[in-house]
């Protein structure tokens, strides 16, 4: 292979490398600033701690209004935690939330790590003060058509392992289309208004980190191909 051929190959590989790199960057870029509601500590490097501590935590009605949710949306989640949706005594009270938006393509995965910690391991208290973490997702295309919209609980203190104050996992959601994904992650205090312990407060916390979009395989392939090609040329030279 002569010098001209090597130069041409190097140019092609560099373009592939740069194209793959740009795809990776753009697929993970947030397009808005994170907005915080309630008792939230921004610890930097994409790590947030949410609590339902009063008086900083916001009422469920306040959060529903600020987030553009239907009135009673959090109460409906609280009532559905037992799996039947008929727990009419369940009630959402105070909570905190963070919201942001990003660009995502069909098939890409929105992901973050979470840890939900309760203040008690008592099954009685966890059943009657079933604090929960929630996610709201709203995906719209470039014409502002709604492609996906939902809000639900992805964790609650009753489901923490027996004898443990906390549980950790990774949340993932695969995009059903391409566009702008507005998301809200939050923590809500809930109780069943049992008269004996009606005035009690069980405080919980939710740690969120590593919020990102897993890019399409094509972007990864181009990025890797560019790195391997550049390494091979440098080695032969």
Image (cartoon, rainbow, N blue to C red):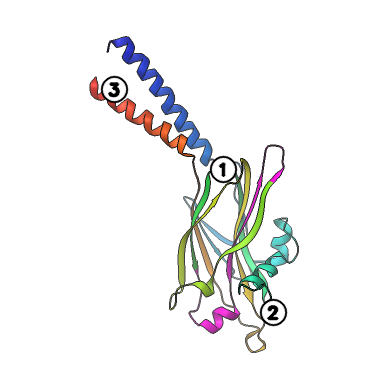
The residue labelled by disc 2 is: 89
**What residue is drawn where x is 73% and y is 67%?**
72
Residue 32 shown in magenta: no
User: Label 3 vs label 2: CA separation?
Assistant: 69 Å
Q: Pick out the residue farthest to the bottom.
A: 196
Tell me the tag on residue 30. Answer: 1
How dense is the environment of label 2, judged by Cα within 10 Å: few (below 14), some, or many (20 and up)? Answer: few
Q: Is residue 155 visible?
A: yes
Q: Position of residue 17 (x, y in %)?
A: 41, 28
Dot 1 or dot 3: first in sequence order is 1
Dot 1 or dot 2: first in sequence order is 1
Dot 3 or dot 2: first in sequence order is 2
Tell me the tag on residue 233. Answer: 3
Residue 134 shown in magenta: yes
How dense is the environment of label 3, judged by Cα within 10 Å: few (below 14), some, or many (20 and up)? Answer: some
Left or right: where does residue 158 sit relative to residue 36?
left
The quarter of the rendered structure image containing the C terminus is: top left
Q: Mark 3 and 2 residues: CB-CB less than 8 Å, in contact?
A: no
Above or below residue 44? Residue 29 is above
Mark 2 element type: loop
User: Which region is colored magenta?
Assistant: 117-146
């Amino acid at each position: 292979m002569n010098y001209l051929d090597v130069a041409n190959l190097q140019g092609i590989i560099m373009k592939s490398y740069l194209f793959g790199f740009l795809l990776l960057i753009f697929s993970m870029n947030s397009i808005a600033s994170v907005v915080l509601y309630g008792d939230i500590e921004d610890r930097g490097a994409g790590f947030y701690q949410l609590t339902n501590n009063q008086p900083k935590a916001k009422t469920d009605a306040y959060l529903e209004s600020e987030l553009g949710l239907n009135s009673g949306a959090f109460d409906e989640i609280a009532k559905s935690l037992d799996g039947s949706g008929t727990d009419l005594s369940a009630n959402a009270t105070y909570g905190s939330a963070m919201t942001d938006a990003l660009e995502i393509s069909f098939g890409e995965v929105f992901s973050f790590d979470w840890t939900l910690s309760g203040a008690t391991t008592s099954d009685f208290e966890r059943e009657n003060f079933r604090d929960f973490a929630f996610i709201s997702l709203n995906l719209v295309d470039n014409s502002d058509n709604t492609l996906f919209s939902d809000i639900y609980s992805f964790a609650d203190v009753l489901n923490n392992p027996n004898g443990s104050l906390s549980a950790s996992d990774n949340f993932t959601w695969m995009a059903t289309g391409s566009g702008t994904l507005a998301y809200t992650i939050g923590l809500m205090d809930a109780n069943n208004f049992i008269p004996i312990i009606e005035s009690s407060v069980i405080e919980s916390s939710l740690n969120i980190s590593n919020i990102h979009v897993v890019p399409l395989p094509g972007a990864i392939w181009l990025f890797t191909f560019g790195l391997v090609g550049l390494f091979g040329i440098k080695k032969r030279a």
